[in-house]
């Protein structure tokens, strides 16, 4: 497990923590497979960032579970929650292992890559510049799936992650994680880099 960032305790819903863990593990798997299959170091690095976030969430979850257990019965009823958290963390660890294939230059056999490159959907990341037509708009308002054939599935703002960010306003320097066709992702990347004035 990587170093856990220092966490000052604040009451956090166990349910909300588990939802975040589930969302992050799903995103990590998507990014890790794409990173490995397309030898994309950028996506692999994002997986490692998410792994650090997951380790912090596991720490927060365990802290809250310990504080919630008042007696033997509570401990028994919370054991299943702890197990779900542990298994979700195992998924994120596996995703990080897949990303490590790229970061450690291990590589994937060309036949595997050929098979997956034929799939319709790909993943990419792109950073938004100040002059981008995406800056200042919500993900929902842009309707990128219809406009360009790509969909923003997560936004990283510094170390803060927004998953399924429909209501989020995109800001300059945000890192967008997007899913779509190769052509759609290329259009999105050009828009994020400020190379086009309309979608």
Image (cartoon, rainbow, N blue to C red):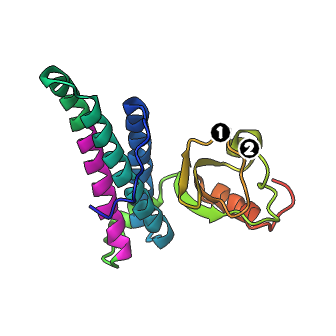
Measuring from the top left, give residue 80's x and y in whole percent.
21, 29
> Mostly what secondary structure, the magenta segment?
helix
Crowding at dot 1, Cα within 10 Å, few <14 / some 14-19 / many 20+, comes out as some
Q: Where are the magenta residues, as a range?
A: 84-103
Depicted 76 relative to depicted 147: above or below = above
Q: In this rendering, is residue 164 above or below 136?
A: above
Disc 1 element: loop
Residue 166: mark in rendering: 1
In the picture, the disc for residue 115 is none
Lower position in the chain sequence, tag 1 or tag 2:
2
At a point 21% along the width and 25% down the height, the residue shown is: 70
Q: Position of residue 48 (x, y in %)?
A: 40, 63
Q: Residue furthest left?
A: 72
Secondary structure, mark 2, is loop
Label 2 crowd (10 A; few <14 / some 14-19 / many >=20): some
Residue 5's x, y, as percent? 39, 59
Relative side of 194 to 31, left or right:
right
Residue 181 belongs to the span the image colors magenta = no
The answer to which of 127 and 110 lies nearer the viewer is: 127
Please state if 135 lies on the left or on the right of 63 as rendered.
right
- Return the residue nearer the eye: 126 or 175: 175
Quadrant in which the N terminus appears? bottom left
Q: Which residue reaches farthest right?
A: 197
User: Picture coordinates of residue 123 (x, y %)?
Assistant: 53, 57
Q: Residue at x 33, y 56 (%)?
A: 95
């Amino acid at each position: 497990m990587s170093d856990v960032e220092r966490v000052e305790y604040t009451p956090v819903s166990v349910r909300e923590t588990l939802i975040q863990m589930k969302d992050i593990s799903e995103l990590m798997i998507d990014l890790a497979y794409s990173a490995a299959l397309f030898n994309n170091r950028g996506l692999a690095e994002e997986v490692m960032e998410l792994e650090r976030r997951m380790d912090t969430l596991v720490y927060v979850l365990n802290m809250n579970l310990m504080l919630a257990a008042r007696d033997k019965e509570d401990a028994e009823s919370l054991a299943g929650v702890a197990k779900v958290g542990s298994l979700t963390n195992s998924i994120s660890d596996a995703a990080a292992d897949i990303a490590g294939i790229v970061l450690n230059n291990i590589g994937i056999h060309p036949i595997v890559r050929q098979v997956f490159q034929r799939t319709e959907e790909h993943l990419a990341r792109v950073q938004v510049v100040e002059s981008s037509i995406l800056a200042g708009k919500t993900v929902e308002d842009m309707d990128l799936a219809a406009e360009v054939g790509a969909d923003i599935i997560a936004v990283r703002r510094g170390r803060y992650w927004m998953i399924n960010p429909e209501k989020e306003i995109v800001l300059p320097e945000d890192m967008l994680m997007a899913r779509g066709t190769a052509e759609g992702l290329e259009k999105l990347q050009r828009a994020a880099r400020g190379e086009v004035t309309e979608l």
